[in-house]
Every structure is written in structure tokens, then in C-alpha cells.
Amino acid sequence: MELDINLSKKAVSEIKYLLKLKELDSSFGVRVGVRGGGCSGYTYTLEFGRKSNSDIQMIKDGVMIFTDPKSVLYLNGTTLNYTDGLQGKGFHFNNPSATQTCGCGESFSV
């Protein structure tokens, strides 16, 4: 099973900045995932951490990304973007497999 997530240039830049700011060593990467919940059925998770034995891993533009095997089914083809405009800043998932998303963009259904 392979993980295929795209990162925008702004997301790559912000991830590298945060890893450096937090003084995390090269064994750390971005853990993305999906869990049940939210108003549309599933929510995204995003945190810094180390790869566990069961994780699926990829490296994109020098950023290590990993997730659990179940989340791969929901995340493949997704683009992770970072915005810092007047409407707020943060990471956002653009998932072409999502059939519905909630108004806040935090949850989705497939």
C-alpha cells in the first residue's frame, strides 16, 4: 500500500519552518490521518511525530509524511495546503474523494 498526498509549496515551507522552530530532529515528520467524528462523518488529524512500525510513509519535497494504513484509503490524492490570509491561517485539506464537507472544512464524508 502506498501513500500519495500532495503538498503545496506554502505547506512545505510552513512544515519545515515549524519543525525547525520546535527543534525537532530529522526522525520527526508530519502525521496525517482520518478519524470518525465531526458533522460530516470524518475529521482530519495533523501533528508532528515519529513513524510507528505500522505506518505508511512517503517523502515529498524533503518532508516526511506518514499515516496509519486505514487512513491511506481516505487520504490518497489529497492536497495539504497552508493559508495565512485575513480569513485565518492554518493547514487545509483538499480531498477529491470527499463527497461532502462541512462549512468549517474540518470534516468530510465519502
Image: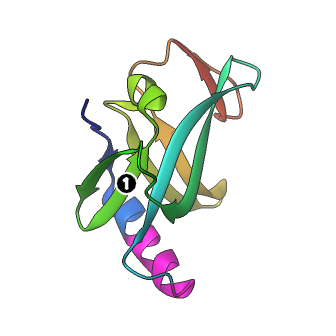
Name the residue that disc number 1 marks: 65
Looking at the image, which is closer to me, 16 or 87?
16
What residue lies at 36% left-to-right and 78% top-to-bottom? 26
Tell me, yes or no, whether the highlighted magenta stretch contains residue 10: no
Q: Is residue 66 left or right of residue 23?
A: left
Local SS, label 1? strand
What residue lies at 31% left-to-right and 49% top-to-bottom? 57
Residue 110 vs 34, above or below: the answer is above
Q: Position of residue 21 (x, y in %)?
A: 54, 86
Q: Position of residue 22 (x, y in %)?
A: 57, 83
Per the rendered image, the range of residues in magenta is 13-23
Residue 35 vs 6, above or below: the answer is above
Q: Position of residue 44 (x, y in %)?
A: 59, 37
Looking at the image, which is closer to me, 110 or 71?
71
Q: Is residue 18 left or right of residue 13?
A: right
Q: Position of residue 89 (x, y in %)?
A: 62, 60
Q: How is the image coloured?
A: rainbow
